[in-house]
């Protein structure tokens, strides 16, 4: 390939990704060139494709669950060496100077940069990433590590923002919930899984991962929940989840985009129930989460696709054709 690479590129909203041969990025000052091994496919990528989220400029190389190794270092990068295994997640940069950054809320920085959105992402053989936003990864297989970088991390942050809870409802049992359910079980929490009504296959998958109860999102759990975490992009789940939590309980929305929330009576929020969203993630979340992941025997359900089949992976995600997470195996690693 010389100094060229293969990438899957989105030229505008509503389109399809196009396979393109393009120059390999050169790491600028403070950046690392990462040779990508695996990149997870996230629902956020679908939101970009559909025009729900509009990047500052086109074209976009999506992908923000990147596992690879350090191929080259830009100027002024310390603490990394070529060949080292690294991860790149959604938060690709922040200014470090604004009131949010100084408060430890870099996830809310107005100048934040996002991998696979305002910075090139991992649907490619290489990407350049800011070294100060690159993670060192625990040992593990590349394909099953990739979903940890968004699904795992965002799921974990969503859970932490819910506060103390023993009975935890997970609305939308996809990549994020299937990882978080295992962590919650290991911490002795009770997991209640809510899927699309009638999706018995996913309900069975949730029970296999230790859910105490699994049912449709239109059903009430057998007991009121302490917290409900919403991972499906469906605004109508918010009143449903509020109805399922006890007074004083929390509903936390983990997704970056949701359809509109229908009107609902104040009585659903009354009783000191809390409703909040999760926006992006911080590097501190990543460090904490990988410590938890290292101690947990996570069983990550992955569905590998070659890089050139990214459109198919996104279609399958949209249609709910698999359990767990789709992952692009960039070098064909893990593909039969
Ligand atoms: Zn994501
Ligand atoms: Zn900032």
Image (spheres, rainbow, N blue to C red):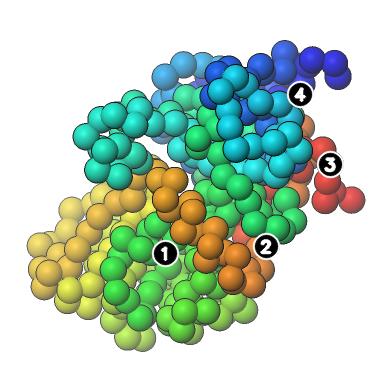
Determine crowd level at label 3: few under 14, some 14-19, many 20+ residues with C-alpha closer than 10 A: some
- Residue 84 rendering spot, x and y as whole percentages: 71, 42
Callout 1: helix, strand or loop?
Answer: strand
**Residue 6 disc label:** 4
| Mark 4 to mark 2 CA distance (whole Å) | 26 Å
Sequence-wise, the earlier of marks 1 and 2 is: 1
Sequence-wise, the earlier of marks 1 and 4 is: 4
Q: Tell me: is circle 3 under 8 Å from ligand 1.
A: no
Sequence-wise, the earlier of marks 3 and 1 is: 1
- Residue 270 rendering spot, x and y as whole percentages: 10, 68
- Residue topped by disc 1: 171
| Mark 1 to mark 4 CA distance (whole Å) | 36 Å
Q: Nearer the viewer, residue 244 or 35?
A: 35
Determine crowd level at label 2: few under 14, some 14-19, many 20+ residues with C-alpha closer than 10 A: some
Residue at far right of view:
336
Q: Residue at x 32, y 76 (%)?
A: 165
Q: Nearer the viewer, residue 271 or 6?
A: 6
- Residue topped by disc 2: 301
Sequence-wise, the earlier of marks 4 and 3 is: 4
Residues at discs 1 and 4 in contact (Cβ within 8 Å): no
| Mark 4 to mark 3 CA distance (whole Å) | 13 Å
| Mark 1 to mark 2 CA distance (whole Å) | 18 Å
Determine crowd level at label 4: few under 14, some 14-19, many 20+ residues with C-alpha closer than 10 A: some
């Amino acid at each position: 390939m010389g100094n060229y690479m293969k990438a899957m590129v989105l030229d505008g909203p509503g389109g399809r990704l196009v396979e393109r041969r393009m120059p390999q990025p050169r790491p600028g000052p403070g950046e690392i060139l990462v040779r990508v091994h695996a990149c997870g496919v996230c629902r956020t990528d679908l939101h970009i494709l559909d025009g729900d989220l509009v990047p500052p400029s086109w074209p976009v190389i999506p992908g923000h669950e990147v596992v690879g190794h350090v191929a080259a270092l830009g100027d002024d990068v310390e603490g990394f060496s070529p060949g080292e295994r690294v991860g790149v997640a959604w938060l690709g940069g922040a200014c470090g100077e604004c009131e949010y950054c100084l408060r430890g809320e870099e996830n809310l920085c107005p100048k934040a940069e996002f991998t696979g959105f305002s910075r090139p992402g991992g649907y490619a053989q290489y990407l350049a990433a800011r070294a100060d936003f690159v993670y060192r990864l625990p040992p593990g297989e590349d394909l099953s590590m990739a979903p940890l970088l968004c699904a795992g991390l965002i799921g974990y942050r969503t859970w932490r923002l819910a506060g103390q809870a023993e009975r935890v409802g997970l609305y939308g049992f996809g990549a994020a919930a299937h990882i978080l359910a295992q962590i919650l079980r290991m911490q002795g929490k009770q997991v209640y899984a809510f899927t699309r009504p009638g999706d018995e296959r996913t309900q069975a998958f949730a029970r296999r991962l230790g859910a105490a109860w699994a049912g449709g999102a239109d059903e009430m759990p057998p007991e009121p929940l302490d917290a409900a975490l919403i991972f499906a992009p469906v605004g109508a789940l918010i009143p449903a989840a509020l109805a399922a939590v006890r007074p004083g309980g929390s509903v936390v929305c983990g997704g970056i985009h949701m359809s509109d929330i229908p009107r609902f009576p104040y009585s659903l929020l009354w009783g000191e129930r809390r409703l909040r969203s999760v926006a992006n993630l911080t590097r501190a979340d990543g460090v904490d989460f990988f410590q938890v992941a290292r101690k947990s025997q996570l069983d990550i359900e992955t569905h590998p696709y070659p890089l050139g089949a990214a459109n198919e992976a996104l279609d399958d995600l949209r249609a709910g054709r698999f359990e767990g997470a789709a992952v692009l195996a960039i070098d064909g690693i893990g593909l039969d």
